[in-house]
Image (spheres, coloured by chain):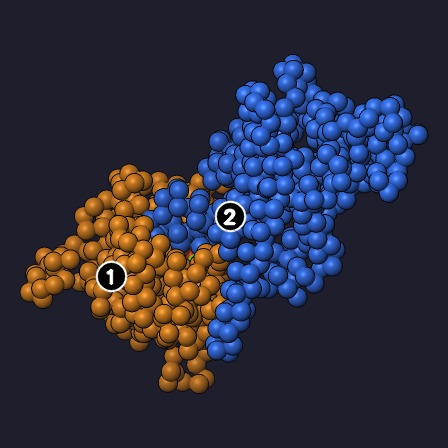
Amino acid sequence: MHVKESAGTVSMTQVQNAGSPHLEVRNLKTYFYTEDGVVRAVDGLSYGLAKGETLGLVGESGCGKSVSALSVMRLIASPGKIVEGEILLDGLDLLQCSEPEMREVRGNRISMIFQEPMTSLNPVFTIGNQIMEAIRVHQDVSRKEARDRTIAMIRRVKISAAETRVDEYPHQMSGGMRQRVMIAMALACNPEVLIADEPTTALDVTIQAQIMELLAELQSDFQMSILLITHNLGLVAEVSDQVAVMYASKVVEHTSTAELFASPLHPYTHGLLTSVPTLGMPREQKLNVIPGQVPNPLHFPTGCRFHPRCPVAEQRCKQEEPLLREVKPGHWAACHFIENGKSPMKGADR
Amino acid sequence: MILGLFGLFLGIAGWHAGTLWESLAHTVQKLSGASVLYTLRDLDFLVSTLFVLGMLVAMGLYSGISCRQIQKTRSLAQLPEGQWSIVKRQFLKNRLAVVGALIILALYLVAFLCPFLAPYDPVEQGDRVQERLLLPSAEHLLGTDRFARDVFSRIVYGSRISLLVGFLAMGLAVTLGTAVGAVAGYYGGWVDSVIMRFVDMMLSFPSLILIITVIALWRNQSIWIIITLIGLMSWMGVARLVRGQFMALKEREFFQAAKALGAGTGRLIFRHLLPNSLTPIIVSATLRVGNTILLEASLSYLGLGVQPPTPSWGNIVYDTKGNLFTEWWMPLAAGMAIVVTVVGYNLLGDGLRDALDPRLRE
Ligand SMILES: Nc1ncnc2c1ncn2[C@@H]1O[C@H](COP(=O)(O)OP(=O)(O)O)[C@@H](O)[C@H]1O
Ligand code: SF4
Ligand SMILES: [Mg+2]
């Protein structure tokens, strides 16, 4: 709190934290022990989210993005289990916290918003009641004060006529409005980190843009770090500072957004980027499709998990799993054949 | 809306508990042996009059409030339709449900207004020689029984027992079943397995026989014990329902969202799971009230339920056991009363289910 009041201290903290990320995930493994076998939904995931920045976590559907987010919140329920790893919030390992300590973190230091605004609100209470509750979970304030803050919060997420809408039920609101309410609830206690799991996937395009704009604005007001989970590369290009690309329960490439779009090094990222149309791309150029299927987390391929679909795979890829390593300053990737910061793919540097 | 329901529940429960107070007053009167300052019937009149006055005041207040609301709505022009009014509309569209609701309402009115409706005291015995076993007539609508008591009055007063048993036994069963089902559904895992095996075991007992055994062993047939026993034998269905409901709600996104906000067990159960399970609980409770009423009637019919002279529909049938063919209208009237009540509750339950289920709308 004190930090936020004086500009001088802010820059000091930023300098101090330049080396260590605000939220860091190291070698996280979350498995589901199902009847069919062990589903390795997250299996050796690592990334770092710097203070005040936005990290885009991208990957195909089913690659473990949501499970990794829920793992950070420690909300994995049986038959799932966090098997290994570290989740460091400003140096505090969340995996070592007790459940009561974790409840203090949730909603207070780290908040989360979900994909489905239509079902993320409790249908039997008014939205005002729910935002008030979000405040009162962590702070001992009177009803009156909580209500005043709620109305202020509703204004803050740009819902008009806050005084009357505070008493509306979720079913009386549109999807975009509900997502704003979700954001208001998530930010009610001033969290340091916001995890947004596909926050706009269920909304139509114009509303998407408005919500992202709102998030960006609130990010600078609240000085939050945002983990933006999405499968939409366009969104990532617009709003993130850093990108982590996930494939088969792991991060395969992690660097700044500009760098990633300018020179993707991992063959998977390369395929991903050429599979989306870009403005000004020659009309006759065909969209690239990554052949093959997303691997099943019940049994991943041996060696590099991407090798059955990789156009430049070699014998070594089938046996040896590549590690995520710094292939260029500030650019991490997990592929055997990235040398001198050059991708094994021809013409990768677009 | 939830507060309203809760208030309604408390009100009815309060009135039912009031009958307990009546029996307390009765005991006090007996114990003190004092010259009778007031008879039970006087007390009854007092309660009924207060009830009528209360109703009038409530009606006045309600019309005042709704007038103001109408004015407000007009000025706001297009207010989106609240969920409550959708439910009301759906419910009113279902004719049978309205009939059920009216039946139950009428029964409660009868129970409240017993002293005004019943021409005679239900327990007072008339002249054993002259007024015994009279045929139905203008004076005694359903004739008199072996003890020269007016049967019509007894049936009117009998409504109190059935409603009391239905409401309190079900209230107990719902409370117990909800608590047990909530624990099983919230915690899941081995807790759930253990609890649900116990529920299965309870379900496999024939409840009537178990209750009869307990009453026989205990040698106590007070109405409160009967209600407790019926309640203790009726909670399993509710427990299963609540457990299933909790399991399904735990998968919903708003539950995840609440957890992500740091809500603890108490909040999760009482703000998120329970309020969202309320409608199926109410519906199933309403549908099961009929069963508890039938159970009490069966017990009373076997002579193990409510003790005469207190009238209950079950023991009215029991009383005419020997004279079934000559006095067929007595058990018939009492039986009809039971049937109408049970059917009324079932219609009401069905109607509530349809009105509250969003999937069946439009
Ligand atoms: N409760 C669960 N039980 C078993 N498997 C699960 C469970 N939740 C997720 N998974 C599996 O984990 C994998 C990753 O899921 P998820 O994180 O939701 O993917 P996404 O990247 O689309 O968000 C999927 O293969 C999914 O089948
Ligand atoms: S390690 Fe081999 S299979 Fe994996 S991405 Fe690199 S080249 Fe392709
Ligand atoms: Mg997901």
Whether label 2 lies within 8 Å of ligand 1 gets the answer: no
For label 1, the residue is A225
* Callout 1: chain: A
**Nearer to me, B22 or B264:** B22
Whether label 1 lies within 8 Å of ligand 1 gets the answer: no
On the image, the x and y values in percent for residue B248 come to 53, 47
Name the secondary structure under disc 2: helix
On the image, the x and y values in percent for residue B4 come to 51, 53
Taking A322 as reference, is A311 left or right?
right
Instruction: Work out whether residue A256 can be spotted.
Output: no
The residue positioned 73% from the left and 47% from the top of the image is: B344
Name the secondary structure under disc 1: strand
Residue B308: quadrant of the picture = top right
The residue positioned 59% from the left and 24% from the top of the image is: B35
Chain A painted colour: orange
The residue positioned 23% from the left and 48% from the top of the image is: A88
**Nearer to me, A325 or B327:** B327
Position of the C terminus of chain B, as image quadrant, is: bottom right
On the image, the x and y values in percent for residue A303 come to 38, 49
Instruction: Work out whether residue A140 can be spotted.
Output: yes
- Foreground: disc 2 or disc 1: 2
Q: Against A46, is B28 above or below?
A: above
- Which amino acid is tagged 1? Ser
Residue A261: quadrant of the picture = bottom left
Taking B50 as reference, is A191 left or right?
left
For label 2, the residue is B6
Q: Which chain is blue?
A: B
Q: Residues within 10 Å of mark 1 (few under 14, many from 20)?
A: many
